[in-house]
Image (cartoon, rainbow, N blue to C red):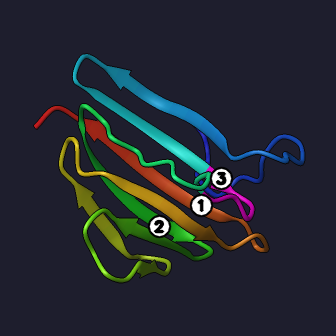
């Protein structure tokens, strides 16, 4: 049991990842971002599908091959198939950006 909207236990300089549930083929995590972005040249290339829901704050994601980033606001979600390369271009620092990410096998 927990609260998705609970503030981080302590102020953090780095993005905070918290696994809420893990089962074979499934991982649900809460991510708290406070202005972080992917390092220059870095792309996520994950072996599992990912469903991501933005709960609070704002962010922009860039999908490889797309001309412009996708801006996400609270309530926006996106499904990223396995190996769909993407990067976080920007996250809102205050209030923090809160994500719910569901990693699963397709």
If you read the primary sequence from the N terminus, does the residue marked by circle 3 or circle 1 appear first? Answer: 3
User: Of callouts 2 and 1, which one flags the residue occurring earlier in the amino acid sequence?
Assistant: 2
Instruction: Tell me if residue 52 comes above or below residue 9 in the rendering.
Output: below
Left or right of 32? Residue 59 is: left
Question: Dot 1 corresponds to which residue?
Answer: 98
- Give how far across and how far down residue 61 sits, in percent: 44, 68
- Residue 96 location in percent, x, y? 72, 66
Main SS category, magenta section: loop
Q: Secondary structure at mark 3?
A: strand
Q: Point out which mark residue 54 bears.
A: 2
- Which residue shows up at 40% across the image and 37% down it? 28
| Residue occupying the point 52% across, 52% down | 41
Question: Where does residue 11 sit, x and y in percent of width and height?
Answer: 89, 48
Q: Tell me which corner region of the image, top left, top right, bottom left or bottom right, holds residue 2.
A: top right
Q: CA distance from mark 2 to mark 1?
A: 6 Å
Q: Which residues are magenta?
A: 32-37
Indicate which disc residue 32 carries: 3
Label 1 Cα crowd, 10 Å radius (few <14 / some 14-19 / many 20+)? many
Along the line of sight, which residue is nearer the eye, 79 or 42?
42
Instruction: Say above or below: 70 vs 97.
Output: below
């Amino acid at each position: 049991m927990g609260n998705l909207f609970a503030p981080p236990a302590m102020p953090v300089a780095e993005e905070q990842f918290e696994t809420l549930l893990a089962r074979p083929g499934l991982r649900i995590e809460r991510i708290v971002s406070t202005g972080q972005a992917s390092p220059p040249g870095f792309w996520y290339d994950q072996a599992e599908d990912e469903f991501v829901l933005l709960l609070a704050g704002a962010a922009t994601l860039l999908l490889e091959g797309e001309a412009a980033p996708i801006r996400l606001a609270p309530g926006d979600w996106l499904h990223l198939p396995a190996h769909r390369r993407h990067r976080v271009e920007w996250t809102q620092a205050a209030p923090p950006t809160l994500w719910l990410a569901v990693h699963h096998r397709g």
